[in-house]
Image (spheres, rainbow, N blue to C red):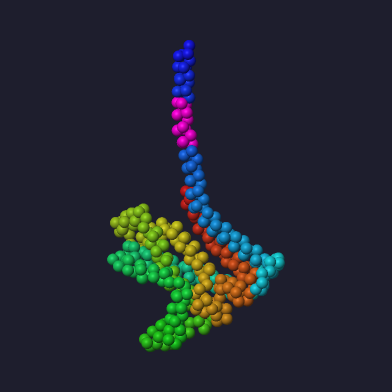
Amino acid sequence: MRPYRVLIAGQGRSAARSRFALREPVRMFDWIKSLKRRIDFASLFVFLFPLLLFLTILYGMLGWTFYVSFANWSGTAPNYEFAGLKWYRLMMSLDRFWVDMANNLKWMILGVIPTVVIALFLAYLLEIGSIKGIESYVRTLILYPVAMSFVVTGTIWSWMYQPDKGVFNTILRSIGLESLTSSFFTNPSTATYWLILIFIWQYLGFAVIILQSSFRTTELQEMIEAATVDGASRLRILFDIIVPNIRGGILILISLLLISALKVFDIVYIVTFGGPGYSTDVLAFFMFIATFQQHLVALGAGLGVIIFLLAFIIVIPYTIYAFRKWFE
């Protein structure tokens, strides 16, 4: 009986060893899965943390601005006493606020529409026009103003607009058209339009690049080639084929330009400082004056809220379009 028991005992140990051997890969696999989950969570945290930090700061500051606009902060020392709509009522009663609103509207209409239209024709000429051989040089020349800061741009154009020795008046005098010379910014009714011209010059290259990138889809290129073979004119190709098929790019461009026109500050600050009087003033510049010169911090915060709400309204059409494209 003893050898038999020994045999049975040996078989039991080998069976237990085999079960352990089977469990070992399972445990190892579970450990690998657990480690992978930890690594995935760590990677997710690494990538999400900067985004969460950015959103916290962004919306935290936005919430703080909303709160301050309802406070009674009107000096250098913070005062968070609730004042209700006091500063909004004061804002609406100021003639300067409505002049700023009208000027911002001029910037958004007269600064954006000419920029988009001119950029569309320039992009079309660069893409399929007769100057395609020098496309890269012309594109660099057009894009160059975008690389310049508004401070530099404003300084250069201030020199060009000088009544006595400015470029424009000097050229007009040299060709015998002294009667057409202008002092540019001394007339309150036209000064804003000369500033808008700077905006168009600055953003034209940016608009050309956005639209030109919209042209270069395989589908659109095939449609253009087919229309060319069929004998369609270049203008018909532009308006009947290209424009309807780049609506997304045009909408993005218009949204970006509208927001840029709404928050314009640097050009006004450098070239006119809001003058003559406050005829060239805009909302962002008024916010700067109210907050840092007049120390009406709550009023400046209220102006910031108005700018944010206007920008939010501008972004809505693009957001609707993006959601429609997303769920198609």
Residue 124, quarter of picture: bottom left
> Would residue 43 be found to the left or right of residue 212 on screen?
right
Task: Say whether residue 198 is left or right of residue 130.
Answer: right
Horizontal and vertical percent for residue 312?
Answer: 56, 61
Residue 119's image quarter? bottom left
Residue ID at (66%, 74%): 75
User: Any magenta on residue 19?
Assistant: yes
Task: Residue at 49% x, 71% y: name it.
Answer: 110
Whole-percent x and y of residue 304?
Answer: 59, 67
The correct choice, above or below, for 240 with respect to 38 in the image is: below
Above or below 24: residue 287: below
Which residues fall within the magenta stretch? 17-30
Q: Residue 280: percent from the left, percent from the top? A: 54, 77
Q: Position of residue 5 (x, y in %)?
A: 48, 15
Q: Is residue 264 left or right of residue 298?
A: left
Q: Residue furthest front?
A: 2
Residue 21 sits in which quadrant?
Answer: top left
Does the stretch in magenta take in 78?
Answer: no
Q: Can the viewer see residue 9?
A: yes
